[in-house]
Every structure is written in C-alpha cells, then in structure tokens.
Amino acid sequence: MWTLAQLSAAFSQAALAWGGAVAVSIPIAIHLLTRYRRQIQAWGAMRFLAASFKKHRRRLRIEQLILLINRCLIVLLAGLAMSGPVLTGCTQWIHAAAGVSARMVHIVIDNSIASSATHDDQPAIERYKKFTNQLANQLNSSDRVVIWQAARSPSGVIRSEPLAPNQVQQHLAKIHHTHAKANLHATLTAIHHTLQQDQHPPNNTFIVMLSAFTRGSADTDRHLNKELHVLDQLANLFALKPAAPGGNIQITSITPSSPQVLTDATGILRTLSINVDLKRFADDTPGTITNVTLTAHYRGDPKPLITKQAQHKWLAGQSEYTLRIHLPVQALSLDDHPSNPDDSHATLNPIGLTVNIQSTAPNAPHDVITVDNVHRAIVCAREGISVSVVSDDIVTHSRHDSSSSAHWLLTALSPGNGPAPVTTSTISPTAISKFTLSGQDAVIVTHPQQLLPSGWEALRRFTDTGGVVWFIMPASHEPPLWLEPLRDTFHIEWHLRVQRLEVSTDQPTPWRLATTNAVPAGLEALSTEWESLLRPVRVYKHYEFDRRAPIDQLLLQIVDGSPLLLSASVGHGTLLLTTTAFDLDWTNLPAKPLFVPLLHETLRTHSARSTARWVQQIVSGDNLPNNHSRADTHPWIPWTINNTANPPNTENDYLQPAIQPTDTHATHEPGFFESSEHTSTRWMAVNPDTPGADTTPIPTERLKQWLAATGQWKWLGHTDAQSIVAQKAQRTSLGWPLLVSVVALVLLETCLARWFSHAAVPRSTTPAGHTQQGFEPTSFGGHNA
Amino acid sequence: MTQDARHTTRYLDGQALASLKPLELRARIVVDGLLSGMHRSPAQGVSVEFAQHRQYAPGDDLRRLDWKVYGRTDKLYVKQQQRESNLDVWLMVDVSGSMAYGSVTSHDAHTWTKFDHAATAAASIAYLALRQQDRVGMAIFDDAIRADARPSNAHDHWRSIVAALAAAAPTRHRNPTDHEQTGGTTDIDRLVDLALAGISQRGLIVFISDLFDDINAIEQALAKACHHGHDAIILQVLDPAERQFPFRAPTEFVGLEAEGRLATSPAALRATYLQALDEHQRAIADIARRFRFDYEILDTSGTLGPPLSKYLARRASTMRRGRG
C-alpha cells in the first residue's frame, strides 16, 4: 500500500498532480450542477418530448456517462502530464517498445592505487562496486550503464560497452584496483567526447564519480579542460562524498648505489648500498615503527640470495626518511647460477631487490594502503669486467717497461695475484677491429695517434653498443693531431690547446687537484677518503682543454679549473679523456693511492651505465619500452615472492581489442619482468605509482571549486544510490505521452459530443415572417421561469 | 395583387396584430385586408335581394355597376344584394393548457401565444362568415366545453363571439411549473360528442387547436363529424419553437397540461422529438384527407391569410354541395 509521501515522491510537481486529481471533481460538479440547476421551460408539446425521452433514456445516460468519464480523464491526465510522473514501469515499456535506452548512466570508478585504501577492513574499490550494484538495481532493463575506469593506463581511458543493468555485476567482478595513479582529467574529457557524440537527452544522462578525492587521486592543482565547462549541460553530475582518508606509509623509491655489482671484487668495494626512501601521508604522529625487509632474488629463483632487515621509528611531524641498507657483495655471488653460454648476456645476471615495509603504530589507521609497501629494483651482478689496453708499448717493447702508461694501467687494473674484478688484455692500435673488441667492456687507448681509420670506426661502433673508450694523452711532445679524427669519429667538439703547459724545473710547486668539488657521480664509493686521495696527486704537464667544449661529467680537475679527467656520452657508451699522460714525468697519479680505485670505479661506473640500459624502472601505468610488446613480456620472479596480494590478472580486464587475453599486464601489475625482443633482453621492475597513494585529504572547498569547473555536482552519501535515478526519473518524457493523450481525449470529446448531438448547433429555420418590422427574430423561452 | 392590397395584407400577420390588444379590432383588420385584396366579392354569384348602393371601387365587378344611377348622377355605383345563407359555421377553439405556449415576443415583450393566434383566427372567420349572412356558432373547449355560442347570424352576434374568446383566453400562468395552475388537457373526441349533440343541421366545423391529443381520439372525433355530414376545416396551431425545438442548454421541461417535469439535454432529443411531431402531423393530414377535410397548420409566426382563404374556398365548396 502506497503512502501519501510515496505517491507525492512519484511526481516532480506533486502539487500539480494533486491539483489534477482534485480538478477531476470539476466536471463531476458541473454535471451535478446541471442536473439540479437546469433552465426551466414550460412546454406544450410534452407528449412528443416525453415519448422521445422514454425511447432514448438509456442511451442518453450512457452517453452522458461516457462524456463525463472522458472529461474527467482529460482533467486528470492534464494534471498528471504537468506534474511529471515517475511511472518507471511505464517508461520501461515505452522505451523497450521504442528500442532505445531510457537512461544512460556513466559511472566513473576510481580504480587507481588510492582505491585500495581500506576503511573498516573494506577497500574503497569494494565500496564503489557495492554502490554501483545498488545503482544498477534501481535501473530498468531499458537503461544502460557505462563503467569508466579512472586509473591511468597506457591503453588510454578504459570504458565498458553500454551494459544492461543485469550485466553490471558481472562486469564489476573483473575490475580490481590497479597500482597506477588516477587520471580523472582524461576520464572526464573522454566522457565529454562520448556524450557529445552520443546525443543522449541530457536529462536522462547521469555521470556518477566514485573516487576518494585525495591528493593522490585528484590533481586539483591542474585545472580541468575548458571544454568540460559544459559537462553539466550534457548530463546530471553526481559525486560520491569522500570518506575520511587515513594515514599511509609507503616506499617512494629504492636506489642501489650502482646498477651493477661485481661479485668477484677483491678490492675496496665489498658492499652494495641501497637507499630506501620512505614517506608517510596524513599522519604525523610519533611512535610509528616501520620495519623494512630487503630481499634479493636471482632471476627465476624463489630462494632468496640474502635478506636484510632495518627499522625506522617515525618522529613527530616527520613525513620523509631515507634508510640506507648495505648488502655484502659476496652475498650476491652467483656460484650456484652458472652463466648460460647460449645467453648473449651471460655476463649480466639480473638480481631483483624487493623491499617490504610493515608499520605498527599506536594510532590506527596509520597505513590504509598496503600495495605501496612493496618496491622493487634490479641490479646486475657480474663476476667482473673486461678491459683492453690499446698500446704499442707493450706489443713492440718490453713488457717490463715500467714507465709506460700501459704498464701503469695493467698493474692498477689487476693489482694482485688473486681473482680480480677486471680482466685485462692488450691490443695493438693497428689491430683494433670489431672482433678484437668483442666481449670487452672498456678500451683504454694510450697511443691514439697510432690508430688506423678502421680502428677509429671500430671504436665508434664499440661506443654505440655501450662500450667505454678512454683516451690517455700520450707522453710525447708531438702535437695531438689525433684529436681531429676523434672529433670526426665521435662527432664531439673537443679541443685541446696544442701548446702544452709544462711545469719548469725552477717552479717549486706543480699543479694540485681541486679538492673542494663534490665527489663525482659514480665515484661515491670513494667519498669518505676523496679529499685525502686527491691531495697527494701532482700534475707536471697537461694539455689545456677548451672549457667551452661539451662535457657530460668532470671527474678530476686541477685547482685552476682545467679539466684533468672528463667524460661524454656517445651512443650507448661513454667517451673518457685524460688531459695528461700516465707517466711520472707528467703526473705522479699512477704512483698515488687514488690511481687504482679511480680506474676501477670509473670503469665500473661507466660500464655499469651501459649495463643499465638493459634494466628499466617502470611505474605502473607506463608504456612499455620501445620495441617491446606485451606478448614478449613475462614475469621472471614468482609472484608469491613479490609479496603482492593478488597475482596478475591474466583475464582481459581492459576492453581494448589490441590487448590479448593471454598478455601479462606488465605495466599494470608491479613485479619483475623480462622482455625479449629479437636478440636483446631487458629486465623491468614495475612499481606502484606512489604519488597516487597520497592520502592527504583535499580541503572541501578546494575540491568543490575544482569540480565546479565542469558544472554543478551533487554530493551523494554511500547509501544514496537510489536517489540518483529516482530523482531524475521525473524527467522522463512520460509527460509528453500524457499530453498527447489529453489532446486525443479532447478531440474524442468533441467528436463524441457531436456524435451524441450534445454539441450540435440547430439550423436556423427562422421563417421569413420573423423579420417583419417591429419584431425580433424568433426568440424562445417566452414562458421561462 | 395591387400595392394597396399588399400593404393591407401585411396586417394579416398575427404577430403584427399582437400589438393590437382588442381582439375585435384584430379580426376586422384581418378580414378587411383579406377582402380588399380580392377581385371578386365573396358574395358574387349568389342570388339575393337588393340591399344598397355603394361607390365603385377598383376591383369591383363591372357587371354589377348600376348604369341607371350612372345615367342620372354621372357617378359609378355598384349594386349590393343582401343574400340569404343557409350555412352554419361552427368554430371549435381549443383553450387547453398547451395553447398557452408562445415563444414569439414583440418589442413590448408581449407574448404571442398559440391561443392568441387561434382566437384571432376564430374571430376573423366569424366576422367573415357573419358578413356573408352565415350562422356562426362557437365552442371553446379543453377537456370540456368551457364556453359556447349558439349559431346565429344576428348583427351583434359577432361581438358576443369575440367577448367569449377574450374571456376564454388561457390564464397567463405566473408559475407554469406549478401543476395546479397548468391548463386542462385536450379531449377533442369528447368535445365533438358534446358539440354534435347540440347541432341539428349540417354545417362547416372549423377546428382551431394544436391537436396535442391522441391520434386515435382525433380520428374518432373527425369520423363522427364526417358521419353527421359535416364538413370540416382543421387548423392546427403550432409555435415555431415547437416546430424547430431549438433548445441546447440542459433544460427542465414542465408540461402545460400536467404531464410533469422532464430534465434532459434537449439537443440530444431534438431529432427524435421532431420526428415524433412530424409523424403526428402526417397522421392528422392522412385522417383529414381520408374524410376530405381541409388541414392547415397555423404557425404563430405566420400570417392568417391562408387559413381564411382556405375557409372561403371550403365554404364555397360546402355551399355547392348543399345545393346539389
């Protein structure tokens, strides 16, 4: 039984509906009044009138009843039409008969990383699904629902086909939170374009946005597109009122000190430093303890190589912290993982570093998002690097010529008799070719003036493929004419003054190295002793470098600012130049403690840079690297080790036809991936888009201002799903059919009245004599009461 | 018809006479107007003794000029004869309640009822008959004879007839819805019985009534008149509203002969009503034709000329049959 309130809610203008219902009494009243307030007419020919009435009494009553009902219906339907009825059942029939969708509901589900935030042990994404299901249950079979996924995706904005309400639940089952950031801008823009092409009636189109509206999900600093300003003219806008966000602690990044680890190193580098950047949002209370666990896995091996733990206790107001964890390089030894001789990158062994955090705090909730508590990085472990020294000294002269640059280099690169991280070899300058350089990581050229054109070309190809070429100034007084072929080969404008600077014997103080500069990148391992290593070095001769020439990195510098060791990127490799000779007449560097670590770290760093191009750090939602397709990508560490709650969903969640159901969604699901393309292989560490997990709430006024750029949004509670369509159902076009019915009934009434002779106008049968002068035309009613 | 005649016959219209209150005056004007429009005297061809001379008037028969007087006085006079007539004319005037209906009004708001029209017609016929030396009797009736006048051709008999008609006019009901004040019903059969009982000589009976009675009763009444050898003229008086039934608004009709009330939508009944009325008129016409009586409808908005002409023609026919 309907209550009065329910009946009133079924009309947009309930007063008009009730007015129409009351107005039904008007024709009834008129009918009754005409019965009791008729014109009285004395009549002589009553005999014939009575006979006529007796003959048609029953028909007259039926006619009057039909007319009365018709007139009541006209008044009633006119009132109903103007009141905007919400007869959803009727609209369903009407639209089903017409074969069109009655209402189009666009639901934007923010399935970004922010939607994994839990409140009362329920992720936000589940609340969104529940709300969507409730909304779908209120729709009719003729209505359609389009579900938009607001998480950033390399495939663009993801939307479903228009779904019947009973298909919504099935579709929702395939939607999970992602690890990417939300992109509400792109989603709203895509909806706007869709609505412009759809041309669905605006009053029957709805946009419902389900998002947490935190700083991570809504970028309110970026204004919405101007074209969205008319969005509210295309649809009715609703947004779910955001719940109070909780605190969140996440790993922003992990950074190994080097992307390459030489496991056989016996030198000074015995540890790998890993910086773990922690951040917390919407919570600055003290006492929260974050336990950090670092695990290293070799590719495809579930058994960890090493596990290290650390802890951090958050201070009051502290929101960021960088934790440094040291891993012994020996622990990353790959004795149990012999290199595959068939693998072209056998010497590169990717090791996955996985860092987990787990926090405990006296106040809950302190960490509502857990998917950002895992972060990954990849380092490549190698037993050592191969370096060739290109010098004619060793080949043509005595190997024991201890004064040559080559001798100093070979000695420094392999200082002892034990296993060395660097394997050395010598090549004659005239023998340099693609084959002699094969398998080398770096080439040190001490006599560039002896290189043949084919040698220059081989060096160029070597740097293009990631090799390191280091030029040492020859200890001769000849002009450096080899600089011209260097510039032509490597297309780098390096210029040296031909006039070398020479310290005269009467000058008591040779040049010193500048010690005030910061430790160059890649030589951080020497940072603790950097100044003490530089101080004893003296330079007696060197070439002055044109400082206007391009330099990527300045590694060593004389106190007057002249570069002594510099580098530039060429192709995938690196070009190094020393402006002095490794000769004791030129500098005492080869005899000082700096020389060995400088060589090792410089070669390790720059060879590692070439190694780093095989390793990719990707944020969830990013595109894959060039020339790598999804079909070639597969995870290379079991998912259980990745400590992710859910394995990658191999079903086709995303409706773009370009993605095959069998693809793994490397850029959507965090983890370690290996991608093979032809002869090259890359390793990728995919991590959550951590800025998207910023749970800092946006001030309400700021959020309203941001949304207002698209029109007027109405805020909804989590139980208001019914009110969206229930309120708007009044705007269905049922009023027009009713108005048409009214017009039809009016026409019917006119026809019926004429048919029943109730509205017939009597023909004028006034005789001519009536118009005689002095008399009115026949006027009737001479004996009216 | 001359221009003067057309001017005069204008006054034969009963409506025009409505503004003339005295019935006597109305009747005189009607008859004089009628006669002045004829080329021949109504007494033409009847053998009578000399009565008087009168000045010739256009339209008089030249054969009746008195040439002797013309020779003596050089003026044209026609000879008028006083003939003797043996025709009895009976006027039967209906004064039932339905005769009180009238829908035609003049500028002075005087309502011209059917009885007004019937009385004027009766007085006119009486006047005309008395001028022709016929004996005129009259009965005013509804369901009984309310007033009567014995047949006579005395000089002042016409005034007594007019007085009876004026006295017998239906009462103008102030509240026609009151059943107690509505008029009596028409009972023409009973009337004829009563009237024929007092008539010993055959004559011409002129029925002036709306004839809102049962058709069988009408037939029986006319059959009795025919059986007694009487000739008859049936003048049915009807109001234009009764003939057209132009009402549209819901109306409560109140019968003038105590038929009660009837609340209805008149537009819905109009067609059926007119059909019933037409059938009734056709039935009367059939009966009249069967008994060789004249039947004429007197519309209260029409003129009185035709019925009077009908009377004169019928009188001549009756006279011929009487001599034959």
Image: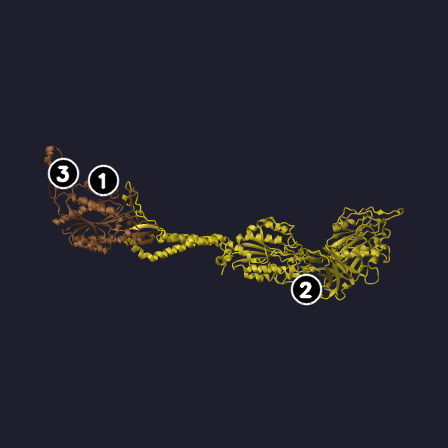
Chain colours: A yellow, B brown
Residue plotted at (36% across, 57% down): A62
Residue plotted at (40% across, 56% down): A69
Q: Tag 2, which secondary structure?
A: helix
Nearer to us in this view, A369 or B49:
B49
Q: Which residue is mark 1?
A: B6
Q: Kindly identify which chain the residue marked by label 3 belongs to.
A: B
Residue B62 is situated, as x and y percent measured from the top left of the image, at 14, 38
Q: Kindly identify which chain the residue marked by label 1 belongs to.
A: B
Assess disc 3: are there few (<14), some (14-19) or many (≥20) residues with their C-alpha within 10 Å of its C-alpha. Answer: few
What is the distance, in whole Å, between disc 2 and disc 1 at their CAs? 127 Å
Above or below residue B237? Residue A614 is: below
Nearer to us in this view, A171 or A90:
A90
Residue B191 is situated, as x and y percent measured from the top left of the image, at 20, 53
Nearer to us in this view, A181 or B179:
B179
Mark 3 or 2: the one toward you: 3
- Mark 3 is on which residue type? Leu
What is the distance, in whole Å, between disc 3 and disc 1 at their CAs? 23 Å
Q: Which residue is mark 2?
A: A639
Residue A395 is situated, as x and y percent measured from the top left of the image, at 83, 57
Mark 2 or 1: the one toward you: 1
Q: In the drawing, what numbered circle is on residue B62? A: 3
Q: Tag 1, which secondary structure?
A: helix
What is the distance, in whole Å, between disc 3 and disc 2 at their CAs? 147 Å
Q: Work out which quarter of the rendered image holds the N terminus of chain B and state it.
A: top left
Q: In the drawing, what numbered circle is on residue B256? A: none
Query: First in sequence: mark 3 or mark 1?
Result: 1
Give the farthest residue toward the right: A506
- Mark 2 is on which residue type? Trp
Q: Visible in this render: residue A520?
A: yes
A266 vs B261, left or right, is right
